[in-house]
Amino acid sequence: MVDNCCAPGCTNKRSKNKCTLFYRIPNAERRAKWISTIKRARSKQNKTERWDPPAVGFRLCSDHFIS
């Protein structure tokens, strides 16, 4: 399975860059914070509705974290 970063405009893939780490969007408290920080619209047609990804299948790459 190839992991893609779910941040808008990011094209990082696990197979493309082996140095980049990919993190699952967490459950519970931190999930809401991550989703609001990612600032991704639900769709191109409805940019005001909040994006709510399923529990599996979406990852954020390490390029979007401050160490």
Image (cartoon, rainbow, N blue to C red):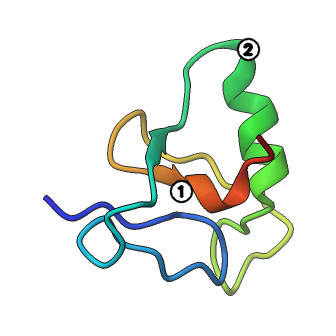
Residue 32 relative to residue 60: left or right: right
Mark 1 is surrounded, within 10 Å at the Cα level, by few (under 14), some (14 to 19) or many (20 or more) other residues, namely many
Give the residue at x 73% y 48%: 65
Q: Position of residue 35 (x, y in %)?
A: 72, 44
The disc at residue 50 is none
Location of residue 47 (image quadrant): bottom right
Mark 2 is surrounded, within 10 Å at the Cα level, by few (under 14), some (14 to 19) or many (20 or more) other residues, namely few
Q: Position of residue 51 (x, y in %)?
A: 67, 55
Residue 7 relative to residue 60: left or right: right
Location of residue 67 (image quadrant): top right
Location of residue 4 (image quadrant): bottom left
Residue type pointed to by label 1: Cys
Residue type pointed to by label 2: Glu
Q: Nearer the viewer, mark 1 or mark 2?
A: 1
Give the residue at x 55% y 19%: 27
List the residue tagged with mark 2.
29
Residue 10 relative to residue 39: left or right: left
Give the residue at x 41% y 33%: 55
Q: Position of residue 40 (x, y in %)?
A: 72, 65
Quarter in which the N terminus is drawn:
bottom left
Residue 46 relative to residue 18: left or right: right
List the residue tagged with mark 1.
61
Q: Position of residue 64 (x, y in %)?
A: 71, 57
